[in-house]
Image: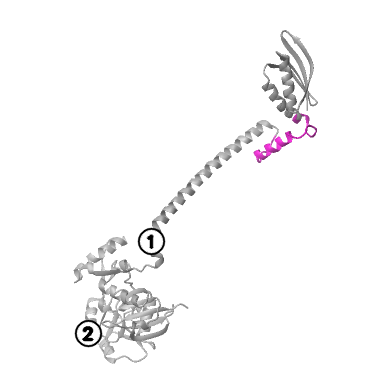
Amino acid sequence: MRHSLLIYLHPDSSLVSWATFDPTGRVINSAQQVSIQSAPKLPAWVLIPGTETLLTQADIPTRQWQRIVQAVPYALEEQLIDDVDELHFALGKRDPKTALIPVVVTKRIQMETYLQRLATVGITTVALIPDLLAVPKPSEGWGIIFWDTLVLVRTGMYTGFTIEVTEMKTALSIALREMTPPKQFTVFRGQAAIDLIPLSILSTFNLPVIEQADNQGALAWLVRGVTQKKVLNLLQGDYQPTNNLARLWQPWRQTATLLLLGGAIYFWQQWLEYQQLNQYYQQLNQAISKIYRDTFPQARKIVNPRIQMEQQLKTLRQPLGKVNPDQNFLIMFNQLSQPFKQTQGVEITQLDYRNGVFTITITVTQWQVLEQLKQGLNNVGLTAKIQTATHRNERIESQLRINM
């Protein structure tokens, strides 16, 4: 099972506390107040001191996220001491009830210090979160965790404060005056009893105090708060992590876009060409059907005119003895038409066909023309015989007998 890492960066200290946990939020190993080098090299959820951040809200009327990001620093400018250019602003989702946008503000130099410190020891940061937003959010009331000399108070989904325990009473009094008082305080602690003084301070506000214990201590509760996924990650904008693949992909993005566009245009052209060819094919099919019907008017059903035409032509090319007289007539007529067409000075006066034999009466101007015609008929596979030949009125009248 894949494990994750929670690291708590203690304020004003080079030491950290860490815990490894599974996807269900169960703590596997943990250590407190140790060197950061001792932390396992796992993807880390990093908690930073809430004392170094400001949790606030901004009223931005536009719904366009890019404009919201640009407007927030200037909408909050009056609440800030430092110049907005020196600050980093992380935004949460707009509250559907109040329409306000939660914002966490911290110094850019502080962000860079956190990330450099983690990168130096080879830790990949998944999220950077104010510690008080890792306090579990109870269904009712405020959640409280005592951590060393600090108290982390979560008053809402994206609201709360981190303060010294010695200043807790004053801070709670101000918060209760400025905010809607909670129905109860829920204190998340370890199995060991905590100092009675903080609890006695809470009891002075005349609100129920609910204690929930975990034998692995405050770190286990912070892990649970993180796995609730009701947190606000500071790794936004300039600090949004990018993986190696994304960096490698960046210079090739425009080239890939052009290739995709070129491919789309090519396939579009192919599709258009296919449609044109298909239309031309349909037109050819219709033309073949018409020719087939004109040639073979007795045909009733045309399924594939091209194939049917080929079959009919193949039948016409069969030897004489294997076809009927009508088909023989067409074959011979087709053969003898060429010699007659190619021989000049021939006039057909009578044509007769019977039992596979053509008897044709012609007139020619010269004997040589008659011999040329006879030779042409023999050359195309026909047998031509001159039955009669009479010279009359400067023309030669002849009767030819032609068979296969």
Q: Is residue 287 left or right of residue 402?
A: left
Q: Quadrant of the C terminus?
A: top right
- Answer whether residue 94 is visible to the viewer in this image: no
- Answer whether residue 45 is visible to the viewer in this image: yes
Whether 200 is drawn above or below 305: the answer is: below
Mark 1 or mark 2, which has the lower sequence index? 2
In the foreground, 213 or 329: 329
Whether 246 is drawn above or below 204: the answer is: above
Q: Amino acid at mark 2?
A: Glu
| Picture quadrant where residue 197 is located | bottom left
Q: Label 1: which residue?
A: 250
Q: Amino acid at mark 1?
A: Gln
- Checking the image for residue 167, the label placed there is 2
Disc 1 packing (10 Å; few <14; some 14–19; many ≥20): few
| Picture quadrant where residue 354 is located | top right
- Checking the image for residue 9, the label placed there is none
Q: Which residues are magenta?
A: 299-327
Q: Is residue 401 magenta?
A: no
**Pointer 1 with pointer 2, Cβ within 8 A:** no
Whether 45 is drawn above or below 243: the answer is: below
Q: Secondary structure at mark 1?
A: helix
Q: Position of residue 50 (x, y in %)?
A: 27, 78
Whether 192 is drawn above or below 108: the answer is: below
Q: Kindly give the residue lying farthest to the front in the view shown.
A: 368
Most frequent secondary structure within the magenta stretch? helix
Frontmost of labels 1 and 2 is: 1
Q: Residue at x 68, y 36 (%)?
A: 309
